[in-house]
Amino acid sequence: MYGMINGAIDKDEMSLKSSGSHQSSTGAPGEKTCTQSGCHSNAFIQQNDTTNTFQFGEKSNTLYSDDTVGIKLTVRKAGTTKFGFQIVCLDSMNKNAGTFVIYDGVRIQSQNADDFVPTAKGRRYLTHTYQGNKAIIPGEIEWTFSWIPPQNGYKGKVTFYMMSNCSNNDQTSSGDQFYSTKFSANYQQVSSVQEKVSYPLHPITIIYNKNSQSFETVLPIYDDIRDIYCFDLVGNTYQLQCQEKSLDGFCQLSMPMQKQIVPGFYGIRVVLNKGAVYTGTSIVY
């Protein structure tokens, strides 16, 4: 799998090679791949293959700044029991574009760029975890997450670069098969009421409840919640779940299943169905 460690290691340490991809190895412009960086040998990358399926929510190929896009990656390879992936999104200048949102922190993790790849500086990636590399059915795996388009005024094409690994699971660095896929969409920054209605940001107070291990806040009762995002200082973005919303608007917001809230500073963004956006911060001790 991705991220294989070279040298003399024991069988338990070999499992580390399945815990995520090598940094900056999607094959995007300016990057190498695992087949070139020394962690895999005798491997060939196939492009424009049907092994990888990139499902881009229900959106068209034109996106707007207030869109949140659901993405599902599916990899199918008969006989494969372990898989891996890495994905990055770049703008027309090959700079990082947008923000990935993690639903399942057990199977998916975020990654920074490789410091030894100057052209990848500032890029943010998603990759599998050790728990997220096993086939869900024989010969098939999928990962689901979301992507928030750029909020910095950029307009133009964005391209997702994805690399998958179909491992032969023989505990060696050779024999794995890699598949490269890219998907492009046109991105438009909302600039007028005629394009889309823009809503101001509303500050809210957010308190962390240590007993319930959830964030608590009060939201308007006249509208339902569309999306809730949580940002930490490390650069991770998670989609929170509203466990409870009472008649007076009180809400309990929790992390995805099996993802614990660790001490630190968090920013939270709540988007309601009618478009209003509420933001707040909270410190967990």
Image (tube, grey):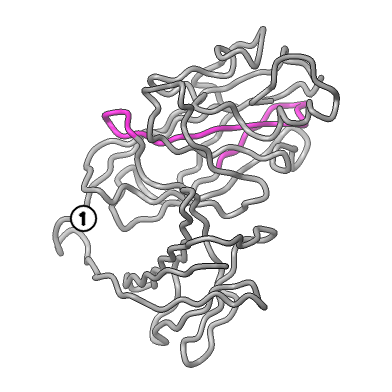
Q: Residues within 10 Å of mark 1 (few under 14, many from 20)?
A: some
Within the image, what quadrant is residue 243 found in? bottom right
Please report the residue visible at 24 percent of the width from the left and 69 percent of the height from the top: 199
Q: Is residue 51 left or right of residue 188?
A: right
- Residue 168 in the image: state x and y as whole percent: 76, 21
Within the image, what quadrant is residue 90 found in? top left
- Residue 29 in the image: state x and y as whole percent: 38, 21
Vertical position of residue 76 compared to residue 267: above or below: above
- Residue 27 in the image: state x and y as whole percent: 47, 21
Q: Is residue 108 magenta?
A: no
| Residue sticking out furthest to the front | 285
| Residue sticking out furthest to the bottom | 248
Q: How many marks?
A: 1
- Residue 179 in the image: state x and y as whole percent: 57, 22
Q: What amino acid is labelled 1 in the image?
A: Val
Q: Is residue 97 left or right of residue 244?
A: left
Which of the pair 257/121 is nearer the observer? 121
Q: Quadrant of the N terminus?
A: top right
Please report the residue visible at 49 percent of the width from the left and 17 percent of the height from the top: 32
Please report the residue visible at 46 percent of the width from the left and 53 percent of the height from the top: 233
Specify start and end residues of the magenta stretch as a single range: 73-95
Dot 1: what SS?
Answer: loop
Residue identified by numbered label 1: 190
Vertical position of residue 198 compared to residue 52: above or below: below
